[in-house]
Image (cartoon, helix red, strand yellow):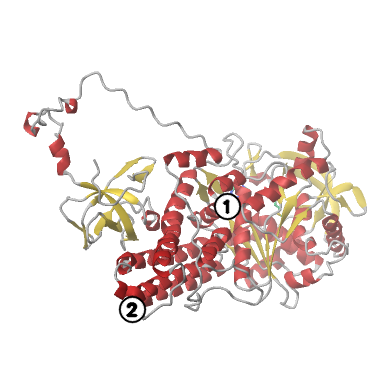
């Protein structure tokens, strides 16, 4: 297995990191951790892009030298990545001496190849994007693609002979059909190149804050030539300047010409794919260096449905969100809610819904139900030995195996959201298994001790599998699960594939250590506080509405018998009428989509009866089934059973909706299922 080298884009340091940057870094960290779990030698590089006109201008505004200005901002980046559990191996700054020396070297190699020549540039330039634009890319003084302001630039410049690389790049794309993921982005890049490439301006003579052009210090090197080079310069040892890095790191992690060496995955947002997929390979070809293996272009994120912008003031810093709700839930949200490669939205509401639903009710509950209760009370806290298996165990083990294989294939295909979906099949199945086995009943019958041991072992082993599969996405929570199971933190080791495949790794007799709930519930006030810590101001509770002047009919003298419906004004019902509708509090035990229906979910809801009710609810476009499992909801229980799509619904879920969405009614405390709603 070839060593894996993962890189984030290096971030501009003209402001603090926001959740858009955090998204790039978390995606990279999760892929890197996954490689480690699979036993591959892996390296994770991030860093900062510090040269260029933008920084030069900002520093001047603040009366600082550019270096002093950027130095001041670096801790914001490193501490944000720490707060998000991102554990990079190296942090490169484009102002590092090891980097500057290698940029000059790469330049010289391109010159020797005859690919850099002096000319004059006249055209549009956007300092915000640090990008050159042609006439057709510009509309009303702004770049069409990014909306950034452009200015007309006319200056002598060194050009890179990009036009000479059109055919070679197309041939390379042809030979490497998975070079860019997702495919749509790859197609965009191919059509851009097919139109024919123009030579690229590679220097500025009006910008001082940059690496000087070797032999002509009147000019500084264009920021992208400088920035892209970080991926190689970071593999140098910092001592050997100039030429190619002559280091083990370089030989291990950069692809070699003979097909050996490492595999490189550059992760970035879609707007900078072209720089990585066209310019960077061309520079490397010119310098005679092998090309990176793949480019993962992720989508863009809006915040609560709005584009991030200065005017909206919604460049959310990631650290307060992680501090308020935990780094791992935020990581989970990024990787589950946003399809990797697609655009997505960061919404505080959905983050909390995922937290309470998938994480609290799904995963946290699973651990709690077994480790904190049954294993303690029935087995003195020790992992029991499993007895004979029934069809239920066989089915759960099969689900675990399917889930692990699917999740592994999806991670290999860089589709973390699908991997998490596959992993959640196991979370749901394990919860359902507990419901089916009813261990709380087994615990009351001493003759069922062995059976109880089998049930407990099966769930604990499923949790062990989950602790490995979830580690790339939620390292801290996975280790917390392991701790409660009595295991050591996951310790990825080169050449040891830890991905679960063999059932039964958990040793009977292991001492479990029940701990605090992984995802403690927030009640309404708690949620308010969490949101406040994330910087969201929540409107205070609405004042109770003032009583209307006219006395409402229902306020009629309490001592008198409620009026019969017949004597009430039209549209008004009596208390007896209201009591005819039996509404109960239900606990959702399982939820599944009804095949061939977008809308219908089939729920099993415990309403205080021997059997849970089967209820079909038309809420599938608003809730993922797993977000409902474990949730308490209000249900009408005396509605005549209703056949729907070949099934029968034995009740109705109460919900409210408006144009902003639909919400199922739930109490804000864990009230006992089955009690009447009144
Ligand atoms: N300095 C260049 C990259 C040079 S790499 C050799 C740069 N820096 S950046 O700070 O502007 O952006 C870095 C990353 O943040 C990009 O991957 C970009 O896609 C990501 N994001 C910035 N805003 C974003 C969103 N709104 N949503 C998701 N990611 C976005 O570009």
Sort mark 1 into few (<14), some (14-19) or many (20+) by Cα contacts within 10 Å. Answer: many
Residue 594 is situated, as x and y percent measured from the top left of the image, at 30, 61
Residue 360 is situated, as x and y percent measured from the top left of the image, at 44, 54
User: Which quadrant of the structure image shows residue 38?
Assistant: bottom right
Give left or right: position of 458 versus 79. Answer: left
Q: Which residue is mark 2?
A: 390
Residue ranking furthest to the right: 215
Residue 169 is situated, as x and y percent measured from the top left of the image, at 69, 65
First of labels 1, 2 by sequence position? 1
Residue at the image position 44 percent from the left and 51 percent from the top: 356
Residue at the image position 63 percent from the left and 59 percent from the top: 28
Helix, strand or loop at mark 1: helix
Give left or right: position of 59 versus 652. Answer: right
Nearer to me, 501 or 411: 501
Q: Which mark is residue 556?
A: none
Q: Which mark is residue 327?
A: 1
Helix, strand or loop at mark 2: loop
Residue at the image position 33 percent from the left and 42 percent from the top: 657
Sort mark 2 into few (<14), some (14-19) or many (20+) by Cα contacts within 10 Å. Answer: few
Q: Foreground mark, 1 or 2?
A: 2
- Mark 1, ligand 1, within 8 Å: the answer is no
Q: Is residue 145 visible?
A: no
Residue 569 is situated, as x and y percent measured from the top left of the image, at 12, 27
């Amino acid at each position: 297995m070839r060593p894996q080298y993962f890189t984030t884009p290096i971030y501009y340091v003209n402001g603090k990191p926001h959740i858009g940057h955090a998204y790039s870094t978390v995606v990279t960290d999760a892929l890197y951790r996954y490689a480690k779990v699979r036993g591959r030698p892996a390296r994770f590089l991030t860093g900062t892009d510090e040269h260029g006109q933008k920084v030069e201008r900002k520093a001047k505004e603040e009366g600082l030298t550019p270096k002093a200005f950027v130095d001041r901002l670096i801790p914001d980046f490193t501490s944000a990545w720490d707060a998000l559990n991102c554990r990079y191996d190296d942090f490169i700054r484009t102002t590092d001496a090891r980097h500057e020396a290698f940029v000059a070297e790469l330049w010289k190699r391109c010159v020797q190849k005859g690919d850099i020549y002096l000319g004059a540039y006249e055209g549009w330039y956007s300092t915000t994007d640090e990008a050159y634009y042609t006439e057709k890319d510009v509309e009303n003084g702004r770049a069409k693609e990014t909306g950034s302001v452009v200015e007309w630039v006319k200056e002598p410049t060194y050009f890179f002979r990009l036009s000479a690389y059109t055919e070679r790049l197309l041939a390379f794309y042809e030979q490497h059909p998975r070079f860019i993921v997702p495919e749509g982005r790859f197609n965009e890049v191919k059509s851009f190149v097919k139109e024919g490439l123009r030579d690229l301006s590679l220097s500025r003579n009006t910008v001082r804050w940059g690496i000087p052009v070797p032999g002509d210090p009147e000019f500084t090197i264009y920021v992208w030539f400088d920035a892209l080079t970080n991926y190689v310069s970071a593999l140098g040892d910092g001592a050997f300047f100039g030429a190619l890095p002559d280091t083990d790191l370089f030989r291990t992690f950069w692809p070699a010409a003979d097909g050996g060496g490492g595999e490189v995955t550059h992760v970035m947002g879609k707007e900078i794919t072209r720089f990585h997929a066209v310019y960077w390979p061309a520079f490397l070809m010119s310098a005679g260096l092998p090309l990176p293996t793949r480019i993962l272009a992720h989508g863009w994120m809006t915040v609560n449905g709005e584009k991030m912008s200065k005017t909206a003031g919604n460049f959310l810093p990631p650290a307060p969100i992680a501090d308020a709700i935990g780094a791992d839930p935020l990581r989970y949200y990024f990787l589950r809610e946003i399809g990797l490669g697609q655009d997505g939205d960061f919404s505080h509401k959905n983050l909390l819904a995922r937290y309470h639903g998938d994480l609290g009710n799904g995963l946290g509950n699973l651990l709690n139900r077994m480790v904190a209760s049954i294993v303690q009370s029935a087995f003195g806290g020790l992992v029991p030995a499993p007895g004979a298996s029934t069809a239920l165990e066989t089915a759960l083990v099969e689900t675990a195996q399917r889930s692990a294989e699917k999740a592994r294939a999806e991670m290999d295909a860089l589709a973390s959201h699908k991997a998490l979906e596959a992993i959640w099949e196991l979370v749901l199945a394990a919860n359902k298994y507990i419901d089916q086995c009813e261990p709380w009943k087994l615990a009351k019958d001493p003759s069922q001790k062995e059976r109880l041991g089998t049930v407990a072992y099966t769930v604990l082993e499923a949790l062990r599998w989950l602790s490995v599969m979830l580690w790339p996405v939620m390292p801290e929570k996975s280790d917390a699960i392991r701790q409660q199971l009595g295991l050591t933190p996951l310790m990825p080791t080169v050449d040891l594939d830890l991905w679960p495949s063999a059932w039964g790794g958990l040793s009977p007799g292991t001492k479990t250590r029940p701990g605090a709930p992984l995802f403690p519930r927030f009640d309404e006030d708690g949620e308010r506080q969490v949101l406040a810590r994330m910087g969201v101001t929540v409107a205070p509770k609405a004042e109770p509405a003032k009583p209307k002047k006219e006395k409402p009919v229902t306020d009629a003298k309490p001592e008198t018998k409620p009026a019969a419906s017949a004597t009430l004004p039209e549209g008004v019902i009596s208390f007896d009428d209201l009591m005819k509708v039996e509404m109960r509090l239900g606990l959702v035990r399982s939820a599944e989509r009804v095949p061939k229906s977008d809308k219908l979910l089939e729920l099993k809801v415990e309403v205080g009866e021997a059997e849970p009710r089967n209820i079909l609810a038309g809420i599938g476009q608003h809730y993922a089934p797993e977000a409902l499992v474990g949730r308490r909801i209000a249900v009408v229980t005396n509605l005549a059973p209703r056949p729907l799509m070949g099934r029968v619904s034995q009740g109705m879920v109460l919900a409210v909706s408006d144009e902003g969405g639909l919400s199922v009614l739930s109490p804000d405390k864990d009230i006992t299922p089955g009690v009447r709603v009144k």
